[in-house]
Amino acid sequence: MVWGSMNIGMTRTFGLLALALSVSATPALAQTAPVTVGVFDADRILAESLAGQQALALFSQLRDQRAGEVQAQQVEFNTLRQQVLQALPGSPEAVSMQRQVEDKSLQLQRLNEDVQNELGARQAALTEEITQKIATIIDELGAERGFTLIFNNVQSGLAYWDPAVDLTDEIIARLDASTGGGDR
């Protein structure tokens, strides 16, 4: 339901707004330092950074290789199934081929599941190192520039932010520099 999902998003947005306002309204914090907020776009960092592009290329290569294997098995399955349809119904040959089709179908199903599991694990492994580097960069930026809060706009539910608080380009530049690609 569209309204239900909008309501959840609005609730999260208003919850974040209330949190920011309560933090800025707390007397102890308000007297010591103003609340400073930064925002970054994790999807853009993964898409535009050299590390993200390298990870995507490796993942795409594995995905294409495994898709080729699945496709080859699918062709074998379809050929065998076509042969069963052409065999004389009830003949020993047809019964034997039908068992082969069932076995091949099960093999194909297992291969698909294995490929999906492998691709999911590989994607997680490829992005884990990048995510850790990004977290370190965000911590450094927060400390260096005195940010009180830094939000990932993809997960935060933010509906608006001033582009002046967007740290995405700086995070990409630092990530590229840390992976040896500072001269883009």
Image (cartoon, grey):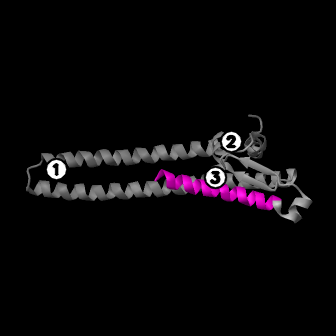
Residue contact between numbered discs 3 and 2, judged by CB atoms under 8 Å? no
Pointer 3 residue: 157
- Residue kind at label 2, given as amino acid type: Ser
Pointer 1 residue: 84
Label number found at residue 49: 2
- Residue kind at label 3, given as amino acid type: Gly
Task: Give the magenta range.
Answer: 1-24
Residue drawn at the location 87% of the way across and 51% of the way down: 144
Badge 1 density bin: few <14, some 14–19, many ≥20, Cα 10 Å: many
Badge 3 density bin: few <14, some 14–19, many ≥20, Cα 10 Å: some
| Distance from the alpha carbon under mark 3 to that under mark 2 | 23 Å
Looking at the image, the residue that sits furthest to the right is 32
Q: Secondary structure at mark 1?
A: helix
- Residue kind at label 1, given as amino acid type: Val
Residue drawn at the location 78% of the way across and 40% of the way down: 164
| Distance from the alpha carbon under mark 1 to that under mark 2 | 52 Å
Q: Nearer the viewer, residue 177 or 145?
A: 145
Residue 108 location (% of width, % of height): 34, 54
Badge 2 density bin: few <14, some 14–19, many ≥20, Cα 10 Å: many
Tag in front: 3 or 1: 3
First along the sequence among labels 3 and 2 = 2
Residue contact between numbered discs 1 and 2, judged by CB atoms under 8 Å? no
Q: Nearer the viewer, residue 27 or 82?
A: 27
Residue 149 location (% of width, % of height): 77, 55
Q: Nearer the viewer, residue 43 or 134?
A: 43
| Distance from the alpha carbon under mark 3 to that under mark 1 | 55 Å
Quadrant in the picture for the C terminus = top right
- Is 105 colored magenta in this rendering? no
